Each structure stands twice: as C-alpha cells, then as structure tokens.
Amino acid sequence: MDIKDTVIRLSEAYGASGREDGAAQLALEMLREYCPDAEYINGNVTGFTGKRREGRPLLVLDAHLDQIGFIVTAVTDDGFVKFSNLGGIDRRLLPAQPVVIHGTRPVSGVICSIPPHLSKGGAGVPEYDDTAIDTGMTGEELRSIVSPGDAVTFDVKCASLAGERLTGGALDDRCGMAAILYALDLLKGCPTKYDVAVIFSAQEELGERGAAIGAYALDADIALAVDVSFATAPGEDPEKCGVLGKGPMIGISPSLSREVTNDLIDTAKTAGIPWQPEVMNGLTSTNADRYSVAREGAKTCTVSIPLRNMHTPAEVIDLTDVELTGRLIAEYIKEA
C-alpha cells in the first residue's frame, strides 16, 4: 500500500460534516479491499475483516471521515453567498481563502470581507455575518446552482514539504483512516487475537454523532479511536503536544482503559515502534468518548497522529507517523 498516495486521495475527497458522500464513497472503495462486505449506512462506512468467531472479543478501529467546512445560509440578490461554520474553525483565516461550494455542481469562490483599512476600528477577527463568498456570478445565476444548506469546503490540494512532511486540508482525520487501512494491509494473512471491525464515522466535528450510532450498533469489547492530536509548533507547550515524526501518541486518561493503554505501550516497546504519551485529564474530545460509554461500555483508547495547524487548510503531518501508527495497530491485533 502506498501510504502517501492513500493519504492524499482521502484528504482531497470532499466530505464536510453531514455531507460526507464523496469521502465516504472513496473510503468504501478502499475498505472493501480488506472488508469485502463493507457498507455505507447511516453516514458511516463500516466493515468486518472476516466472520465473527465464537468467544473472540470484537475490536473496533474507528477514524472519522468528515472534515470541517461551512454551510450556505443565503444567496444575496447581488450575487454573494452567506455561510456559517460546520465544526470549529478559526475565523482569523477566513479572508481571501479559496473555497468550493457543493451545489448541483461544484462552484469555485473566494471568501471576501471588508478590507482592514476600511473597517471601523481597524482589522479584527471577522464574524461570519461580515463575510461572504464571491463567485463572480449574479444572484440569479447562483440560485440556479446553489441553495441554502449546501456545503462548502476549502479549495486546497496536498503538497509535499521537506522529508516526509505533507500539508493539506482534511488531514484531520483522513490520515487516521489511512493508518487503519495500512494496518489492515499489514494484517493480511495473519492470525489475530480479536475479531476486527472498522468504522469510518460521520459527523465527528459536530459532536461524534456517527460514532455514537456506530458504537451502539457494533457493541465492541475494545475500541481504538485513531485520530489526530496537536503537534509542537512555535508558541505551543511541548508538554501538551506530540512531535512530528516521533510516532503515534498513545492516550492516557481517566476516561480511557488503562489496560488497553498499557497493552499498546507494551506492544510498541516489544515491536521497537517509537511512541509518545498523550495525557488527558478527562474526556478526550474524540470518538473514544462514545465507545467507552456505549451499552455496557468498551475498553477504549486513543491512538493519535501528531498534526500542526489543526482545522485549517494548511494542516501538516509527517507520513512516518501514519506508517508507525498503522504498524502499532497491526502489532496490537496480531496473534502472538
């Protein structure tokens, strides 16, 4: 499996929260190589790597397939598209960003706002009411293609940086999906300690909604939420961040299973896989929070890929971390 190609293809697929069809169809195609019966249902892409075996615990690998984006709220008579956010977005980066409106056909546009030298009180953080998308079309032309409720995503392609670094949009959490697919690739033909299900879940950015229904439906014994977490950057507290290229971050939290955390750490040490701790003092703000309390509760842990510039069109990862995350997952699942 070509990890870089997989990450790029997934990252560049359209899939804003609640409008994940494009990313979901690609994910379904990729997952069916390992889970032939995988299906796209209720927003989630779900599959089993084989038939259930009596007495074997079920382990679920979860990564969310949605990305942050926007939703159209109105089309003005003078040809501007008003919008609001889908997920947490830093409004400071909005002006001049190129976007794609996903109407009856894709429409390119750019976010515009009042220039700083014309703003009352000078430049500041724009409110959504102070911004709009300019497509160059008239209001009449736009209304034949774009409607309130349509989704909008940043118009961005991935680009290679030095070494194994990659920048792009929606790397949160398409790189987590790629890590799971790589783990499945490594597990081909290997006996496993668990029955394995995979879920690429919807609407994580809106409150882990896809994971909530997936966790209930699958009723896992063990769940690994494979997501991203903060990587060190200028001004960041290194004690609260991972380091790009230093391996997956294993979750340690009172809301997670210490047993699974310890098993993952032992697996990493035995296999010689670099890893980093991610200490949280409560909930994780990931899909893990849903699995740990679904039905009778699953033993749950997070495995996170360090990422810079989260929830922007210029997220940065190191592909080495994606590979190491996939290796850790595979080693954890393999029969000793």
Image: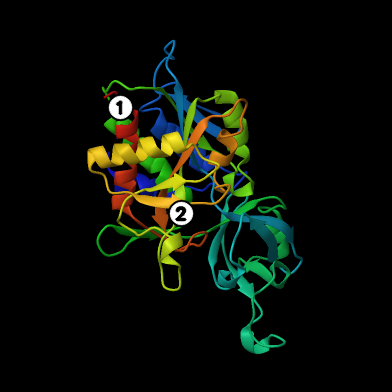
Residue 196 spot, x, y in % from top left = 42, 25
For label 1, the crowd category at 10 Å Cα-Cα, with few meaning under 14, some 14 to 19 and many 20 or more, is some
Residue at the spot x=49%, y=36% of the render? Answer: 257
Residue at the spot x=48%, y=53% of the render? Answer: 170
Return the disc, 2 or 1, that comes first in the chain's sequence: 2
Amino acid bearing label 2 = Ser
SS of the residue under disc 1: loop
Q: Which of 82 and 245 is in front in this view?
A: 245
Amino acid bearing label 1 = Lys
Q: From the viewer's perspective, is residue 90 above or below residue 21?
A: below
Q: Is residue 116 left or right of residue 261?
A: right
Residue at the spot x=73%, y=61% of the render? Answer: 75
SS of the residue under disc 2: strand
Rendered image: mark on residue 334: 1
Q: Nearer the viewer, residue 97 or 241?
A: 241
- Residue under pointer 2: 229
Residue 94 spot, x, y in % from top left = 58, 69
Question: Quadrant location of the N terminus?
Answer: top left
For label 2, the crowd category at 10 Å Cα-Cα, with few meaning under 14, some 14 to 19 and many 20 or more, is many
- Residue 180 appears in the picture as rendered: no
Specify the farthest residue to the right.
77
